[in-house]
């Protein structure tokens, strides 16, 4: 039986009450922790089976943010490999791995803010898209250091996460201008750098983020405006080491328009797109700043993977 609390978390991720790749990953870790605390399993095998079942439920919520599967991998892999461990040891392992993941994740966002803020100069005008905890961490840290920055925030239709970003920036005191997504090219020449987050980063340095990110990157590239991505190491996608593609989630067309009012219309609603590495100047991670061409090496190190092996 899945506990009501775990069902609520799963549902909140699916319906985007909990959203943003970092928050999704931490909520996943929390769901595995709750499952472990509440388990009625009597043997290690029963417990692992329960973890697998809950992991599958979580994996079925949103397919693009690799932070979700990377959180599950980090928390469950070691306990699963501990063949001779008894039930209590396994439960302790899962809980401590989940706590470790949540702590490291929050710490990474803070570190990314500190590292990224060094790339922001006093007086900079920044553009951001959607709502990214990592991108905001960079902007807010620079602002709190006394740098006078201003931010252009795109609405990020259809879900309008830009409004969450705008509210958060205003709360911090950052001068904020809201624009519609289609005004990006109109304003890009006023901007010193673009900062966005990521849901998945591929081994070739391509970044999967909120739909519209690649258009913004294209406009920045055309106008020679710097384009930064801020993301923790667990946003790098291990499957891409062996050529797997990142699945792009397509959401309910009713998020865009009430289908009942347009009988016969076809509506497509991809939630993410792919920005090629050529348009990205740097990726800010908690381990430091890397060019997109170093994504392969970061993945190899992070997952201790060697060519020829199955992806972790
Ligand atoms: C959110 C989104 C964010 C990334 C990074 O999409 O695209 O830019 O998830 O966010 P959605 P963070 O609203 O569909 O989840 O830096 O907070 O992990």
Image (cartoon, rainbow, N blue to C red):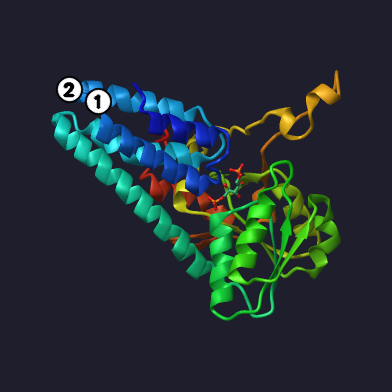
Q: Are marks 1 and 2 in contact (CB under 8 Å)?
A: yes
Give coordinates of residue 77: x percent, y percent.
31, 35
Q: Disc 2 on helix, strand or loop?
A: loop
Q: Quadrant of residue 271?
A: top right
Classed neighbour count for the residue bearing mark 2: other residues with Cα under 10 Å, few (<14), some (14–19), many (≥20) = few
Which sits in the foreground, 273 or 129? 129
Between 59 and 224, the residue placed more toward the observer is 59
Q: Mark yes or no: residue 255 visible.
A: yes
State the quadrant of the C terminus.
top left
Instruction: Classify mark 1: helix, strand or loop.
Output: helix
- Vertical position of residue 122 compared to residue 107: above or below: below
| Separation (CA) of disc 1 from disc 2 | 6 Å
Q: How many marks?
A: 2
Residue in front for this viewpoint, 296 or 257? 257
**Tag on residue 43?**
2
Q: Is residue 53 above or below residue 304?
A: above
Residue placed furthest toward the top: 264
Q: Position of residue 277 (x, y in %)?
A: 64, 51
Horizontal side of residue 277 vs 104, given as left or right: right
User: Neighbour class for label 1 at 10 Å: few (<14), some, many (≥20)?
Assistant: many
Mark sitting on residue 65: none
Vertical placement of 50 versus 141: above or below?
A: above
Q: Is 149 left or right of 56, judged from the image as shown? A: right
Q: Is residue 281 visible?
A: no
Q: Quadrant of the N terminus?
A: top left
Residue wearing tag 1: 47
**143 up-or-down from 62: above or below:** below
Residue at 16% x, 36% y is 89
Say left or right for 243 vs 162. left
Residue at 27% across, 31% down: 38
């Amino acid at each position: 039986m899945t506990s009501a609390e775990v069902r609520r978390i799963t549902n909140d991720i699916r319906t985007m009450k909990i959203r943003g790749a970092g928050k999704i990953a931490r909520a996943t870790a929390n769901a595995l922790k709750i499952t472990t605390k509440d388990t009625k399993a009597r043997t290690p095998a029963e417990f692992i089976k329960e973890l697998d079942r809950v992991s599958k439920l979580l994996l079925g919520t949103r397919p693009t943010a690799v932070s979700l599967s990377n959180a599950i991998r980090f928390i469950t892999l070691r306990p699963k490999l501990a063949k001779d461990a008894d039930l209590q040891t396994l439960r302790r392992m899962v809980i401590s791995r989940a706590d470790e993941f949540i702590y490291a994740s929050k710490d990474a966002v803070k570190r990314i803010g500190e590292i990224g803020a060094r790339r922001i100069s006093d007086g900079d005008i920044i553009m951001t898209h959607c709502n990214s905890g990592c991108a905001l961490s960079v902007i807010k840290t620079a602002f709190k250091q006394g740098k006078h920055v201003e931010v252009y925030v795109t609405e990020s239709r259809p879900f309008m996460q830009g409004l969450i970003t705008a509210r958060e920036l205003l709360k911090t005191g950052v001068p904020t201008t809201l624009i519609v997504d289609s005004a990006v090219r109109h304003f890009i020449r006023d901007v010193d750098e673009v900062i966005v987050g990521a849901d998945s980063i591929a081994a070739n340095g391509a970044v999967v983020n909120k739909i519209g990110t690649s258009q913004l990157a294209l406009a920045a590239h055309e106008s020679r405006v710097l384009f930064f991505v801020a993301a923790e190491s667990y946003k790098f996608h291990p499957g891409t080491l062996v050529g797997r593609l990142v699945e792009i989630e397509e959401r309910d067309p009713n998020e865009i328009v009430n289908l009942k009012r347009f009988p016969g219309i076809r509506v497509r609603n991809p939630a993410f797109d792919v920005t090629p590495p050529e348009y990205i100047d740097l990726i800010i991670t908690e381990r430091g700043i890397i060019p997109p061409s170093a994504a392969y090496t970061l993945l190899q190190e992070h997952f201790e993977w060697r060519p020829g092996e199955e992806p972790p």
